[in-house]
Image (spheres, rainbow, N blue to C red):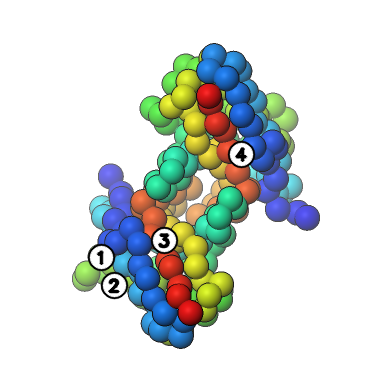
Amino acid sequence: AQSVTQLGSHVSVSEGALVLLRCNYSSSVPPYLFWYVQYPNQGLQLLLKYTSAATLVKGINGFEAEFKKSETSFHLTKPSAHMSDAAEYFCAVSLERTGFQKLVFGTGTRLLVSP
Amino acid sequence: DTGVSQDPRHKITKRGQNVTFRCDPISEHNRLYWYRQTLGQGPEFLTYFQNEAQLEKSRLLSDRFSAERPKGSFSTLEIQRTEQGDSAMYLCASGLAGTTGELFFGEGSRLTVL
């Protein structure tokens, strides 16, 4: 069964520093991979998605992620953190090829940004 | 606003009471999903509909839970005889079958069972 593992439940960075949030996936078939962001008391918003096209995916708010099949990873990065980036980030995997759009989420990483 | 909307946003109830949540998806989306999110965890799949048909239910969805999408538009999720363990955020999402798996989420309905 497919799954994702997010390393680190909390990541702290200073404003302006590099953001790196880690996600490793497990899937028997080429997956579709997603990063979602959740602000307090809100639903999830899609940041970016990998659907087997370019391995480097650019998303909203300056985030990007690189699909590395050899490492089964899909880490999320942003060159320079902003205070407004403080939120919970979820990596998710989908087996759309099965015709089923269910997302399997990781446990999330809370990003803390200090001034 | 043409996003996914959920009602109510917050519900506090006593153990044993029934509660119902409503979700209005993006109008052109034929798939509608319910997820549950507990504190410190990622969302967990509960069930999904394609049009009015409920195509899969998670084992997390006990007999006390029932979901409907009677006309293929809005959906309701009812929890009967609530238990404290039902306290969670219930998220609704919608999407289009045959697309690349992107789901659009509502802001969720937070349930607190006392």
- Residue at the farthest left position: A70
Which residue lies under the disc numbered 4? B109
Q: Estimate the spatial distance between the alpha carbons at disc 1 and disc 3, rounded to whole Å.
A: 22 Å
Residue drawn at x 46%, y 59% as measured from the top left: A88
Label 2 is placed on what type of residue?
Lys
A47 to A98, vertically: above or below:
below
Q: Nearer the viewer, residue B42 or A67?
A: B42
Front disc: 3 or 2: 3
Helix, strand or loop at mark 3? strand
Which residue lies under the disc numbered 1? A72
Label 4 is placed on what type of residue?
Ser
The reply to whether dot 2 and dot 4 touch (C-beta < 8 Å) is no
Q: Are marks 4 and 3 on the same chain?
A: no
Q: Estimate the spatial distance between the alpha carbons at disc 2 and disc 4, rounded to whole Å.
A: 36 Å
A50 to A31, vertically: above or below:
below
Which residue lies under the disc numbered 3? A110
Helix, strand or loop at mark 1? loop
A19 to A107, vertically: above or below:
below
Label 3 is placed on what type of residue?
Arg
Front disc: 4 or 1: 4
Front disc: 4 or 3: 3
- Residue at the farthest front position: A115
Q: Crowdedness of circle 3 by 10 Å Cα count: few (<14), some, many (20+)?
A: many
Label 1 is placed on what type of residue?
Thr
Which residue lies under the disc numbered 2? A68
The reply to whether dot 3 and dot 2 touch (C-beta < 8 Å) is no
What chain does mark 2 sit on? A
> What is the quadrant of the N terminus of chain A in the image?
top left
